[in-house]
Image (cartoon, rainbow, N blue to C red):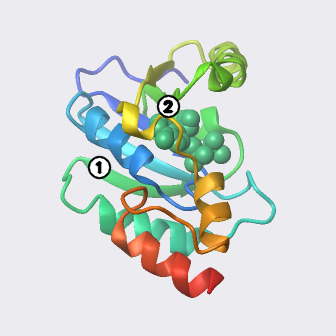
């Protein structure tokens, strides 16, 4: 069923968020002032061996998005477009850091449009300071105790420290 053509626009920001970084937060801050409601949706089934279990990823996201009253954290599994339809979303939000992100994101967006033409994928660019930042890199650096300051929220830094020693 097509989503209602209402004026209130819900955007879904899907991802692994394993863990949330300041790059994700930068995008959330930009999107929260554009969309009426932003649902940060943690994918349960993307990565078979995540560092943080879904519940912990959600807890961290909830803590760091608490101040935005129109931002909600949720979990989904299965087809993203089924979830987006069920939530009555009009937009899928994705971040593009560099050209390297573009090819994969383009493929996903085109396929998602085929599945559900009524829902638009919107790409946003993070602040330059975060354009090289990924959860994968954060995890790798944390494992070597070499994570520079200012890349992840404090709660994530703490949990990384307990997780990887
Ligand atoms: P996925 O496994 O779906 O790529 P991620 O948690 O890695 O999940 O990323 C979720 C979304 O956030 C993706 O659109 C990704 O491009 C975007 N993203 C990740 N890191 C950044 C960043 N530093 N700046 C902007 N967008 C980002």
> Does the beta carbon of the residue at mark 1 sit less than 8 Å from ligand 1?
no
Q: Tell me the crowding category of disc 1: few under 14, some 14 to 19, or many 20 or more residues within 10 angstroms, Cα based.
A: many
Instruction: Determine the residue positioned at 61% across, 32% down.
Output: 81
Residue 52 in sight here = no
- Horizontal and vertical percent position of residue 15: 58, 46
Picture disc at residue 95: 2
Instruction: Determine the residue positioned at 68% across, 70% down.
Output: 51
- Horizontal and vertical percent position of residue 123: 47, 22
- Horizontal and vertical percent position of residue 2: 51, 20
> Does the beta carbon of the residue at mark 2 sit less than 8 Å from ligand 1?
yes
Q: Is residue 57 left or right of residue 28?
A: right
Instruction: Tell me how far mark 1 sits from mark 2, CA to CA.
Output: 17 Å
Q: Secondary structure at mark 2?
A: strand
Q: Secondary structure at mark 1?
A: strand
The reply to whether the C-beta atoms of the residues labelled 1 and 2 are less than 8 Å apart is no
The foreground one among 27 and 149 is 149
Ligand 1: which quarter? top right
| Closer to viewer: mark 1 or mark 2 | 2
Instruction: Determine the residue positioned at 52% across, 65% down.
Output: 147
- Outermost residue, right side: 48
- Horizontal and vertical percent position of residue 105: 65, 23
Q: Tell me the crowding category of disc 2: few under 14, some 14 to 19, or many 20 or more residues within 10 angstroms, Cα based.
A: many
Picture disc at residue 71: 1
Vertical order, 159 against 141 (above or below): below
Vertical order, 102 against 52 (above or below): above
Is tag 1's residue or tag 2's residue first in the polypeptide sequence? 1
The foreground one among 154 and 48 is 154
Vertical order, 60 against 121 (above or below): below
Q: Quadrant of residue 100?
A: top right
Quadrant location of the N terminus in the rendered image: top right
Instruction: Determine the residue positioned at 29% across, 58% down.
Output: 65
Residue 21 in sight here = yes
């Amino acid at each position: 069923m097509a989503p209602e053509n209402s004026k209130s626009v819900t955007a879904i920001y899907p991802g692994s968020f394993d863990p949330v970084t300041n790059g994700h937060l930068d995008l959330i801050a930009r999107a929260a002032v554009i969309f009426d409601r932003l649902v940060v949706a943690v994918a349960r089934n993307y990565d078979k061996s995540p560092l943080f279990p879904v519940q912990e990823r959600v807890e961290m996201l909830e803590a760091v998005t608490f101040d935005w009253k129109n931002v909600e954290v949720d979990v989904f599994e299965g087809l993203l477009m089924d979830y987006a339809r069920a939530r009555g979303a009009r937009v899928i939000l994705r971040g593009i850091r560099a050209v390297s992100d573009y090819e994969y994101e383009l493929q996903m967006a085109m396929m998602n449009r085929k599945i559900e033409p009524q829902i638009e994928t919107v790409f946003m660019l993070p602040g330059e300071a975060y354009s090289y930042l990924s959860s994968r890199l954060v995890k790798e650096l944390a494992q070597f105790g070499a994570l520079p300051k200012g890349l992840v929220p404090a709660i994530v830094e703490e949990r990384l420290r307990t997780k990887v020693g």
